[in-house]
Image (cartoon, rainbow, N blue to C red):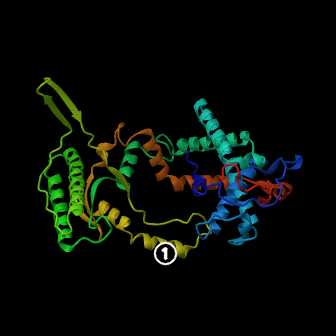
Amino acid sequence: MINFKKLAAAAVSVTLSATLFGCSTPAIGSNTKSALTVDGYDVPAGLFIYYTLQGYSEAAAKLQTGSDSLKPDDVKGKQIGSDDATEWIQNKATEYCVDFVSIMREFEAINGELSAEDKEQAAQMAEYYYSSDARLEENGVSLDTMKLMAENSYKEQEIFKHYYGFDGEKGCSEEELKDYFDDNFARVKYVSISLLDSEGNKLSDDEQRTLRKKAEDYAKQINSKSKELDKMLEVDAVQEDYTKYQEEQAAAAETTTSALAPTVNETTTTTVAETTTTTAEEGTTTTTTTDPYANEVLMQKNTTTTKAADADTDTETTTAAAEDVTQSDDYKFKEFLFNDIKKDTATVYDYNEDTIYVVIRGDLRERMTEDGYWTENYIQNLQSMRYYEDFTKFLDDKAKSLDYNKNSAAYRRYDPFKLKLEDEKNK
């Protein structure tokens, strides 16, 4: 499901390992069945409790500095930004409740209606998550509440499709989305050649020269093919040859103590999409089809900016992190793929001082087919990616326009540190 507003929050498990705080779980009283009222809608206490548990997990993640999960005692009373932990967590819960109602209201505004299939999938999802976290029932969150949440996520998807789908007023055409796909992703196949031995030690200069020559020969071998399809297939042949070479080198190392320089294998392997074999004895013909797209990967273009998960993130820290990323081997490799490499031409690339790539970038548009990269799932993901920021702002603006009133008695009763914060059953 999309859940744009909470993608960052979803990365934080609600079931963080923690020690149970020594307070009894509050029962839902008659004057606290509703935690707050948003745009005239009484938000059920169970929904607020669920979001409080989620807010606690986010707070613990923000305060965590090592690998060990924090206990509630480690979180309670701590400052997060300008708020103490309790206030910060309840503010998060409030925000998510307002988001919930905002989605519900917008779904009504577009006259949305969930299909029977969507409702069934939402019910199954609710049951799965409800059974996977015992704290929900222990804290008074019902299965019906989880179903409300699951259906709300499906409503969010329908709102997105309404505005940002191919027929939506804020979306783009199919051809424009294909342009976006082609601009931001690369279809790649490569063979990684290591300049280290099996124990991680640098090979000798002669061995490294031999492997570099082998890489250059591999690139020539691939480029000797005239069609892209055959070039992509030839990468697999090159990989097989290099794997065989490594095995031979490993076997030789076991039988000799002298440093033997590896010999370049000049054999060119021809691979075609279909190979026909005739068996003389039986007089039968067998046709084997090789998948030319096996082992290819999609790589996403580097982003030019990094965005903080929320407003509390320090700008200088984020900027420094972005600068560090631009110095990584992976970042530099992607810059090469999108700015320097010639399509349909195998090239030798120094990934780092220990690794050489023989890499080729194919034509992505050739694979934008129903049995390739232009399925409903790819289309939805691309639309979500392209309009993530726009839709997030759209939802934020809708949520900010809603009035809400807190039930102070409910906020006191459902203080996060009065809840059971550990799932003993699934610990």
Q: Is residue 204 above or below residue 142?
A: below
Q: Position of residue 104 (x, y in %)?
A: 67, 43
Relative placement, left or right, of 118 versus 358 is right
**Residue found 44% across the figure and 73% down from its top:** 323
Q: Residue at x 52, y 71 (%)?
A: 318
Q: With 40 as the anchor, is 301 left or right in this view?
A: left
Which residue is at a point 74% across and 67% down the rendered structure image? 73
**Residue 161: image x %, image y %?**
53, 42
Q: Quarter of the image holding residue 96?
A: bottom right
Q: Which residue ends up furthest to the top in the rendered image?
A: 283
Residue matched to label 1: 320
The quarter of the displayed image where residue 270 is located = top left
Location of residue 54 by image quarter = bottom right
Q: Position of residue 425 (x, y in %)?
A: 69, 49
Quadrant where the image shows the N terminus: top right
Residue flagged by tag 1: what amino acid is it? Ala
Whole-percent x, y for residue 398 in the image: 65, 52
